[in-house]
Image: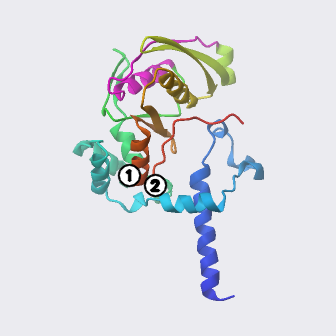
Amino acid sequence: MKFSDFLNIFLRTALCTAAIVLLVGCHRKDAGKSNDNTSPSDIEIISDSDYHEYLEDYVDTGAMSFEEISEILNELGISVDHDTLEMAENSWDGMEPYETDPLNKIEFVLSYVGEGTYDSNTKVFTPSSDKVYCFKLENGVNDEAIETFFKGINSISGGEFEINDVKLQSISEKEKESGVYKRNIKFRLNGRSCSYDAEIYYDWFDINLIEYINQMLKQQKNSNRLYYNDGNITCEVFYCSDEWAKNFAAKTGCQLRTEGYAEL
């Protein structure tokens, strides 16, 4: 075998491995398990067509400067002020390469842009962006986290919908100790009563709640949907059209979706 042939095979194998890691990710319900328990059935092998599609859509955000990222986001209508950009950059520079290498740098910046602030005393959420809302997926099951989520979603609605009158089912100590249970969440969307049974898995937010809200938006004939990316520990949510979501993915390499995880 020629060295050039061997090199091509090696590079293809390395790229494919990277693609698998990026595309497969970790199911939230497996988040508490040790990597030592991974079995061959947990590994998804992607097809050649998916692999080539991944290469076509790949954007090397790691090579971008933070100023370039700010320009891209501004082109998408997402304003990034100097202080927020500096905060994200300082945090990034303080991390080790093994921590930053798997991350999409644009997603990382967005986690600062859309975080907002919550005053636990007054229960007032102050958004930091009207285009993106970002929240942590872990520690996302207590009352404050769920109530803040709805307020964050309202802040990016552009006035097209409003969620209020949120009522959370009380949780027994036995359920809290087990870590795995269902919790009913009631709310009103544009005045219409909605009820969702969240699948609680320890501290992880049930991302399928976003899919449920989208179903309600569809029933109410809203043209836009909640699109989100939860590739890291944080989740970035946008209220936008399908065309905008595709343009966002093309510029950033961050694929957005409207549906949650299918049950295994």
Q: The residue tagged with tag 2: helix, strand or loop?
A: helix
Q: 205 or 224: which is nearer to us?
A: 224
> Percent position (x, y) of residue 73?
31, 47
Q: In the displayed structure, does residue 103 sit left or right of residue 86? A: right
Q: State which quadrant residue 203 falls in.
A: top right
Q: Which residue is mark 2?
A: 100
> Percent position (x, y) of residue 137?
52, 34
Q: Give whichever of discs 1 and 2 has the lower sequence position.
A: 1
Start and end of the magenta stretch? 143-172
Whether the magenta-drawn stretch holds residue 208 is answered as no
Q: 84 or 134: which is nearer to us?
A: 134
Bin the neighbour count of mark 2 within 10 Å (Cα to Cα): few under 14, some 14-19, many 20 and up.
some
Contact (Cβ within 8 Å) of mark 1 with mark 2: yes
Bin the neighbour count of mark 1 within 10 Å (Cα to Cα): few under 14, some 14-19, many 20 and up.
some
> Percent position (x, y) of residue 94?
38, 52
Q: State which quadrant residue 52 falls in.
A: bottom right
Q: In the displayed structure, does residue 137 sit left or right of residue 94? A: right
Mark number for residue 197? none
Q: The residue tagged with tag 1: helix, strand or loop?
A: helix
Type of amino acid under label 2: Thr
Above or below, comparing residue 105 to residue 163 in the picture: below
Q: Which residue is mark 1?
A: 92
